[in-house]
Image (tube, rainbow, N blue to C red):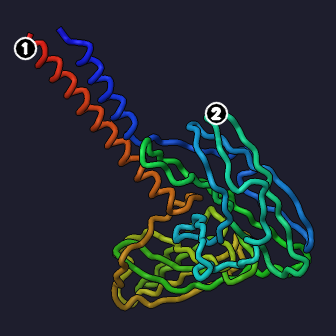
Amino acid sequence: MVSQLHIKSILALIFIVAMIIPVSATITVSGTTKFMQTMAPGQNTTFPITLTTDTASDYDITILGFKNGDNGGYVGVNDPTLYDTTPKAKPSIAFNEKEIHLESGKPTTIDVIVSVPDQCNEGLYALINIHPKVASSSGASIVTAINVPVMVTVSGVTLTETGKINNIEFKDSKIATTFTNTGNHHYYGAINEIVIIGAAGKETKLTNAMDTAIVPGGKVIFVQTIDGSILKDGTITTSNVRSSDGKIMATMPVTVIEQKDLESIPQQNNVVSPEEKDEINDAVDRSTLIAAAIIVLVVIGCIGYFVLIRNRN
Protein backbone atom coordinates (compact mmCIF):
# COMPACT_ATOMS: atom_id res chain seq x y z
CA MET A 1 0.00 0.00 0.00
CA VAL A 2 1.01 3.58 -0.52
CA SER A 3 2.06 5.25 2.72
CA GLN A 4 1.08 8.76 3.80
CA LEU A 5 4.73 9.75 3.31
CA HIS A 6 4.52 8.77 -0.35
CA ILE A 7 1.30 10.75 -0.82
CA LYS A 8 2.78 13.81 0.86
CA SER A 9 5.87 13.58 -1.35
CA ILE A 10 3.75 13.50 -4.50
CA LEU A 11 1.63 16.43 -3.34
CA ALA A 12 4.76 18.43 -2.53
CA LEU A 13 6.17 17.71 -5.99
CA ILE A 14 2.94 18.86 -7.66
CA PHE A 15 2.93 22.05 -5.54
CA ILE A 16 6.54 22.87 -6.52
CA VAL A 17 5.77 22.37 -10.21
CA ALA A 18 2.69 24.62 -9.93
CA MET A 19 4.82 27.35 -8.38
CA ILE A 20 7.37 27.38 -11.22
CA ILE A 21 4.90 27.21 -14.09
CA PRO A 22 4.50 30.77 -15.54
CA VAL A 23 1.05 32.30 -15.11
CA SER A 24 -0.35 34.19 -18.06
CA ALA A 25 -2.41 37.28 -17.23
CA THR A 26 -4.34 39.64 -19.49
CA ILE A 27 -5.10 43.31 -18.93
CA THR A 28 -7.89 45.10 -20.79
CA VAL A 29 -8.91 48.76 -21.11
CA SER A 30 -12.50 49.96 -21.17
CA GLY A 31 -13.91 53.45 -21.47
CA THR A 32 -11.20 55.55 -23.12
CA THR A 33 -9.05 53.23 -25.22
CA LYS A 34 -7.70 56.12 -27.31
CA PHE A 35 -7.71 59.84 -26.51
CA MET A 36 -8.14 61.88 -29.70
CA GLN A 37 -9.35 65.45 -29.27
CA THR A 38 -8.94 69.04 -30.46
CA MET A 39 -7.75 71.35 -27.68
CA ALA A 40 -6.77 75.02 -27.44
CA PRO A 41 -3.36 76.27 -26.22
CA GLY A 42 -3.40 76.49 -22.43
CA GLN A 43 -6.36 74.13 -22.10
CA ASN A 44 -6.46 71.22 -19.64
CA THR A 45 -8.73 68.20 -19.69
CA THR A 46 -9.05 64.95 -17.75
CA PHE A 47 -10.16 61.58 -19.03
CA PRO A 48 -10.52 58.20 -17.27
CA ILE A 49 -8.91 54.87 -18.12
CA THR A 50 -10.55 51.79 -16.60
CA LEU A 51 -8.33 48.70 -16.27
CA THR A 52 -9.32 45.09 -15.63
CA THR A 53 -7.17 41.98 -15.30
CA ASP A 54 -7.87 38.28 -14.86
CA THR A 55 -4.89 37.80 -12.52
CA ALA A 56 -3.91 40.05 -9.60
CA SER A 57 -0.73 41.94 -10.42
CA ASP A 58 1.17 45.22 -9.93
CA TYR A 59 1.58 47.65 -12.85
CA ASP A 60 3.64 50.73 -13.65
CA ILE A 61 2.26 53.57 -15.78
CA THR A 62 4.64 55.56 -17.97
CA ILE A 63 4.49 57.99 -20.90
CA LEU A 64 6.31 56.99 -24.07
CA GLY A 65 7.08 58.68 -27.34
CA PHE A 66 4.87 57.71 -30.25
CA LYS A 67 5.88 56.50 -33.69
CA ASN A 68 4.70 54.00 -36.29
CA GLY A 69 6.13 50.55 -36.88
CA ASP A 70 6.76 49.37 -40.44
CA ASN A 71 3.26 47.91 -40.72
CA GLY A 72 1.62 51.03 -39.27
CA GLY A 73 1.24 49.72 -35.72
CA TYR A 74 1.81 52.12 -32.82
CA VAL A 75 5.22 51.80 -31.18
CA GLY A 76 6.24 53.36 -27.87
CA VAL A 77 9.69 54.96 -27.76
CA ASN A 78 11.49 55.70 -24.51
CA ASP A 79 14.82 56.84 -25.98
CA PRO A 80 14.67 60.58 -26.89
CA THR A 81 17.27 60.05 -29.63
CA LEU A 82 14.89 57.65 -31.38
CA TYR A 83 11.78 59.76 -30.85
CA ASP A 84 10.97 60.94 -34.38
CA THR A 85 7.74 62.82 -33.59
CA THR A 86 7.10 65.94 -31.53
CA PRO A 87 8.49 65.45 -27.99
CA LYS A 88 6.13 67.99 -26.41
CA ALA A 89 3.38 65.55 -25.52
CA LYS A 90 5.35 63.69 -22.85
CA PRO A 91 5.53 66.56 -20.30
CA SER A 92 1.93 67.52 -21.19
CA ILE A 93 0.47 64.32 -19.71
CA ALA A 94 0.10 63.44 -16.03
CA PHE A 95 -1.92 60.93 -14.03
CA ASN A 96 -2.99 60.50 -10.45
CA GLU A 97 -1.05 57.25 -9.99
CA LYS A 98 2.27 56.07 -11.43
CA GLU A 99 1.81 52.54 -10.17
CA ILE A 100 -1.29 50.52 -9.49
CA HIS A 101 -2.32 47.15 -8.09
CA LEU A 102 -5.11 45.35 -9.93
CA GLU A 103 -7.22 42.60 -8.39
CA SER A 104 -8.61 39.86 -10.58
CA GLY A 105 -11.94 40.85 -12.15
CA LYS A 106 -12.12 44.17 -10.28
CA PRO A 107 -12.18 47.25 -12.60
CA THR A 108 -9.91 50.09 -11.45
CA THR A 109 -10.01 53.61 -12.90
CA ILE A 110 -7.14 56.10 -13.16
CA ASP A 111 -7.45 59.74 -14.25
CA VAL A 112 -5.20 61.12 -16.97
CA ILE A 113 -4.63 64.88 -17.26
CA VAL A 114 -3.68 66.38 -20.64
CA SER A 115 -2.37 69.96 -20.66
CA VAL A 116 -1.63 71.88 -23.87
CA PRO A 117 1.22 74.39 -23.49
CA ASP A 118 0.38 78.08 -23.93
CA GLN A 119 2.75 78.24 -26.89
CA CYS A 120 2.11 75.22 -29.08
CA ASN A 121 2.24 75.13 -32.89
CA GLU A 122 1.88 71.41 -33.59
CA GLY A 123 -0.04 68.34 -32.50
CA LEU A 124 0.76 66.37 -29.35
CA TYR A 125 1.34 62.62 -29.55
CA ALA A 126 2.24 60.05 -26.90
CA LEU A 127 1.45 56.54 -25.67
CA ILE A 128 0.33 55.82 -22.12
CA ASN A 129 2.07 52.52 -21.43
CA ILE A 130 0.64 50.28 -18.69
CA HIS A 131 3.03 47.41 -18.05
CA PRO A 132 3.67 44.88 -15.29
CA LYS A 133 6.33 45.33 -12.69
CA VAL A 134 9.29 42.94 -12.84
CA ALA A 135 8.06 39.50 -11.81
CA SER A 136 9.55 37.78 -8.79
CA SER A 137 11.87 34.80 -9.25
CA SER A 138 9.24 32.36 -7.93
CA GLY A 139 5.80 32.00 -9.42
CA ALA A 140 6.82 34.12 -12.41
CA SER A 141 4.00 35.77 -14.35
CA ILE A 142 3.76 36.64 -18.02
CA VAL A 143 1.48 39.67 -18.15
CA THR A 144 0.54 41.60 -21.25
CA ALA A 145 1.28 45.31 -21.48
CA ILE A 146 -1.12 47.76 -23.10
CA ASN A 147 -0.83 51.17 -24.77
CA VAL A 148 -3.40 53.97 -24.83
CA PRO A 149 -2.68 56.41 -27.70
CA VAL A 150 -2.97 60.16 -27.09
CA MET A 151 -3.43 62.30 -30.22
CA VAL A 152 -4.19 65.99 -29.64
CA THR A 153 -4.90 68.43 -32.45
CA VAL A 154 -4.18 72.00 -31.31
CA SER A 155 -6.79 74.52 -32.45
CA GLY A 156 -5.56 77.61 -34.26
CA VAL A 157 -2.62 75.75 -35.78
CA THR A 158 -2.47 75.42 -39.56
CA LEU A 159 -2.51 71.70 -40.25
CA THR A 160 -0.16 70.34 -42.88
CA GLU A 161 -0.82 66.86 -44.23
CA THR A 162 2.20 66.10 -46.36
CA GLY A 163 4.49 63.15 -46.94
CA LYS A 164 7.28 61.72 -49.02
CA ILE A 165 8.14 58.35 -50.52
CA ASN A 166 11.60 57.35 -49.33
CA ASN A 167 12.11 54.43 -51.68
CA ILE A 168 10.50 51.57 -53.59
CA GLU A 169 11.92 48.08 -53.45
CA PHE A 170 11.08 44.88 -55.29
CA LYS A 171 11.34 41.22 -54.44
CA ASP A 172 9.67 38.32 -56.21
CA SER A 173 5.98 39.21 -56.32
CA LYS A 174 6.06 42.08 -53.82
CA ILE A 175 6.55 45.83 -54.08
CA ALA A 176 7.39 47.72 -50.87
CA THR A 177 6.87 51.49 -50.72
CA THR A 178 8.41 53.28 -47.72
CA PHE A 179 6.50 56.44 -46.83
CA THR A 180 7.04 59.15 -44.18
CA ASN A 181 4.55 61.66 -42.78
CA THR A 182 6.37 65.01 -43.11
CA GLY A 183 3.46 67.14 -41.86
CA ASN A 184 2.46 68.27 -38.38
CA HIS A 185 -0.75 66.24 -38.08
CA HIS A 186 -1.75 62.58 -38.10
CA TYR A 187 -3.98 61.16 -40.80
CA TYR A 188 -6.01 57.99 -41.20
CA GLY A 189 -6.77 56.02 -44.33
CA ALA A 190 -3.61 56.76 -46.34
CA ILE A 191 -3.77 54.79 -49.60
CA ASN A 192 -0.86 53.45 -51.62
CA GLU A 193 -1.49 53.01 -55.33
CA ILE A 194 0.87 51.13 -57.62
CA VAL A 195 0.57 51.80 -61.37
CA ILE A 196 2.49 49.41 -63.62
CA ILE A 197 2.85 50.06 -67.35
CA GLY A 198 4.17 47.02 -69.19
CA ALA A 199 6.22 46.88 -72.37
CA ALA A 200 3.04 46.59 -74.47
CA GLY A 201 1.52 49.63 -72.76
CA LYS A 202 -0.89 47.61 -70.62
CA GLU A 203 -1.67 49.38 -67.35
CA THR A 204 -2.12 47.55 -64.03
CA LYS A 205 -3.27 49.26 -60.83
CA LEU A 206 -3.07 48.00 -57.25
CA THR A 207 -4.21 49.77 -54.07
CA ASN A 208 -3.62 49.18 -50.39
CA ALA A 209 -4.97 51.30 -47.49
CA MET A 210 -3.43 51.83 -44.05
CA ASP A 211 -6.01 51.33 -41.29
CA THR A 212 -4.01 53.02 -38.55
CA ALA A 213 -3.10 56.69 -38.18
CA ILE A 214 0.31 57.77 -39.46
CA VAL A 215 1.68 60.26 -36.94
CA PRO A 216 4.05 63.16 -37.75
CA GLY A 217 7.46 61.70 -38.52
CA GLY A 218 5.98 58.21 -38.71
CA LYS A 219 7.54 55.92 -41.32
CA VAL A 220 5.54 53.00 -42.69
CA ILE A 221 5.92 50.42 -45.45
CA PHE A 222 3.08 49.64 -47.82
CA VAL A 223 3.42 46.12 -49.26
CA GLN A 224 1.67 45.13 -52.48
CA THR A 225 1.59 41.64 -53.99
CA ILE A 226 1.65 41.41 -57.78
CA ASP A 227 2.10 38.94 -60.60
CA GLY A 228 5.88 38.62 -60.74
CA SER A 229 5.88 38.17 -64.51
CA ILE A 230 4.67 41.77 -64.93
CA LEU A 231 7.89 43.22 -63.50
CA LYS A 232 10.28 42.74 -66.37
CA ASP A 233 13.25 44.81 -67.49
CA GLY A 234 12.09 48.20 -68.69
CA THR A 235 8.72 48.08 -66.92
CA ILE A 236 7.77 51.50 -65.57
CA THR A 237 6.28 51.42 -62.10
CA THR A 238 4.81 54.43 -60.30
CA SER A 239 3.95 54.39 -56.60
CA ASN A 240 1.91 57.16 -55.01
CA VAL A 241 0.41 57.72 -51.58
CA ARG A 242 -2.74 59.78 -51.21
CA SER A 243 -4.95 60.82 -48.34
CA SER A 244 -8.38 59.35 -47.70
CA ASP A 245 -9.98 62.27 -49.56
CA GLY A 246 -7.90 61.60 -52.68
CA LYS A 247 -5.16 64.23 -52.28
CA ILE A 248 -1.84 62.89 -53.60
CA MET A 249 0.83 63.50 -50.97
CA ALA A 250 3.78 61.82 -52.67
CA THR A 251 4.65 59.98 -55.87
CA MET A 252 7.73 58.22 -57.21
CA PRO A 253 8.30 56.61 -60.63
CA VAL A 254 10.78 53.74 -60.99
CA THR A 255 12.00 51.96 -64.11
CA VAL A 256 12.69 48.34 -63.31
CA ILE A 257 16.21 47.50 -64.46
CA GLU A 258 16.68 44.38 -62.37
CA GLN A 259 14.99 42.67 -59.46
CA LYS A 260 16.28 44.21 -56.23
CA ASP A 261 16.71 42.08 -53.14
CA LEU A 262 15.14 42.93 -49.82
CA GLU A 263 16.40 41.49 -46.56
CA SER A 264 12.78 41.28 -45.47
CA ILE A 265 9.51 42.89 -46.42
CA PRO A 266 7.18 43.12 -43.40
CA GLN A 267 3.77 41.58 -43.82
CA GLN A 268 1.26 44.41 -43.58
CA ASN A 269 -1.45 43.30 -41.21
CA ASN A 270 -2.60 46.74 -40.04
CA VAL A 271 -2.74 45.59 -36.40
CA VAL A 272 -2.70 48.36 -33.81
CA SER A 273 -0.18 46.88 -31.53
CA PRO A 274 3.36 47.47 -30.85
CA GLU A 275 5.98 44.91 -31.94
CA GLU A 276 6.23 43.93 -28.26
CA LYS A 277 2.79 42.32 -28.54
CA ASP A 278 4.30 39.69 -30.86
CA GLU A 279 7.10 39.12 -28.37
CA ILE A 280 4.59 38.73 -25.53
CA ASN A 281 2.50 36.27 -27.56
CA ASP A 282 5.63 34.26 -28.37
CA ALA A 283 6.55 34.20 -24.69
CA VAL A 284 3.06 33.06 -23.74
CA ASP A 285 3.17 30.29 -26.36
CA ARG A 286 6.55 29.11 -25.09
CA SER A 287 5.39 29.17 -21.47
CA THR A 288 2.26 27.21 -22.37
CA LEU A 289 4.33 24.49 -24.08
CA ILE A 290 6.76 24.34 -21.16
CA ALA A 291 3.90 24.10 -18.66
CA ALA A 292 2.21 21.32 -20.66
CA ALA A 293 5.48 19.38 -20.89
CA ILE A 294 6.09 19.71 -17.14
CA ILE A 295 2.57 18.54 -16.32
CA VAL A 296 2.94 15.52 -18.61
CA LEU A 297 6.25 14.60 -16.97
CA VAL A 298 4.74 14.92 -13.49
CA VAL A 299 1.80 12.70 -14.43
CA ILE A 300 4.10 10.09 -15.97
CA GLY A 301 6.35 10.24 -12.90
CA CYS A 302 3.42 9.79 -10.52
CA ILE A 303 2.08 6.82 -12.49
CA GLY A 304 5.50 5.20 -12.54
CA TYR A 305 5.93 5.85 -8.84
CA PHE A 306 2.58 4.19 -7.99
CA VAL A 307 3.41 1.21 -10.22
CA LEU A 308 6.78 0.81 -8.56
CA ILE A 309 5.30 0.93 -5.06
CA ARG A 310 2.54 -1.53 -5.99
CA ASN A 311 5.07 -4.01 -7.47
CA ARG A 312 7.17 -3.82 -4.30
CA ASN A 313 4.12 -4.61 -2.21
The quarter holding residue 95 reads bottom right
Q: Nearer the viewer, residue 187 or 2?
A: 2
Relative to 73, is 124 above or below? below
Name the kind of residue labelled 2 in the image.
Gly
Q: Nearer the viewer, residue 17 or 84?
A: 17
Q: Which residue is mark 1?
A: 312
Q: Position of residue 89 (x, y in %)?
A: 75, 72
Mark 2 residue crowding within 10 angstroms, few (<14) / some (14–19) / many (20+) = few
Q: Position of residue 110 (x, y in %)?
A: 76, 49
Q: Which mark is residue 29?
A: none
Q: Nearer the viewer, residue 175 or 26?
A: 26
Q: Position of residue 202 (x, y in %)?
A: 46, 79
Q: Which mark is residue 105?
A: 2
Relative to 72, is 34 above or below? above
Q: Nearer the viewer, residue 257 or 282?
A: 282
User: Residue drawn 53% across and 76% down?
Assistant: 194
Q: How many marks?
A: 2
